[in-house]
Amino acid sequence: MSTDNNTFKILTLGESGVGKTAILRRYVENKFEKHHLATIGIDYQSKTIKIKNKEIKLKIWDTAGQERYLNLASHLYKGADGIMLVYDITDEYSFSKITDWMEQINSNLSKNEIGIVLIGNKSDIEDRIIDTEKGEEKAKEYGIQYFETSALNGNGINEAFEGLAKQILKNYKIKNNDVGSRTISLQSSKPEDIVENDKKARKCC
């Protein structure tokens, strides 16, 4: 990584099955797999984009939504610059859990210092349960941006990630008055490091 680049750490959060991995694969690889294994623990991919002539490297961490992995995910909050919080527009439960996820985010991070976007995924499905207005209202409740996406056809995904990156840039500009002069580094570069640390923590005491 060159010294004039910015590296932003982004977490994808949400219940299992909402499409976090599918969104990430569509964004980074422009691929969609209808059937894939659920994420076990943590995975991440990266993509470099340009925003306002600034080269931004996004390191996007894909976290499992299962409750038993929440403790592991908490390690990842350290150093996070942005959160992509995802629910499934065809699943009322995943939408209802947004409140719990926001509480966890707020207990680990200062909302004023990071970018957060709310994503209603699977917008290609006609038989939706959560309408757009309801998603927008939920986002407004928390003062965050709202996007609808489809990992199947790619609609809205670029816009969601770029919107989040712009929000992160804005936050750093306000905080530092010169985003282009600093590099934001990840606390840990490998997901296996976090997994190993979690194993050690559980053995302790």
Image: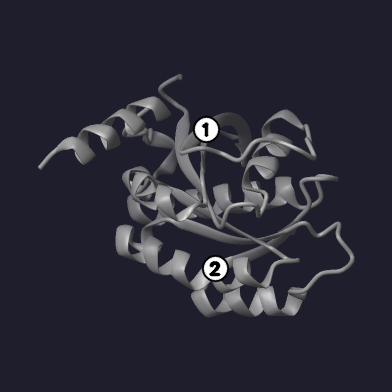
Q: Residues within 10 Å of mark 2 (few under 14, many from 20)?
A: some
Q: Position of residue 78 (x, y in %)?
A: 31, 45
- Depth-wise, is mark 2 or mark 1 nearer the camera? 1
Percent position of residue 122, x then y: 77, 56
In the rendered view, would you say 144 is above or below 83?
Answer: below
Q: Which residue is mark 2?
A: 144
- Looking at this rendering, what residue extends furthest in the left direction? 205
In the image, is 156 to the left or to the right of 135? right
- Tell me the kind of residue under disc 1: Tyr
Task: Give the quadrant of residue 104.
Answer: bottom left
Q: Secondary structure at mark 2?
A: loop
Tell me where residue 155 appears, x and y as whole percent: 81, 50
What residue is disc 1 on?
Answer: 44
Check whether the beta carbons of the residues at disc 2 and disc 1 lie within 8 A of each other: no
Quarter holding the C terminus is: top left
Question: In this rendering, would 8 be left or right of 200?
Answer: right
Inter-mark Cα distance, 2 to 1: 24 Å
Work out whether 124 lies above or below 25: below
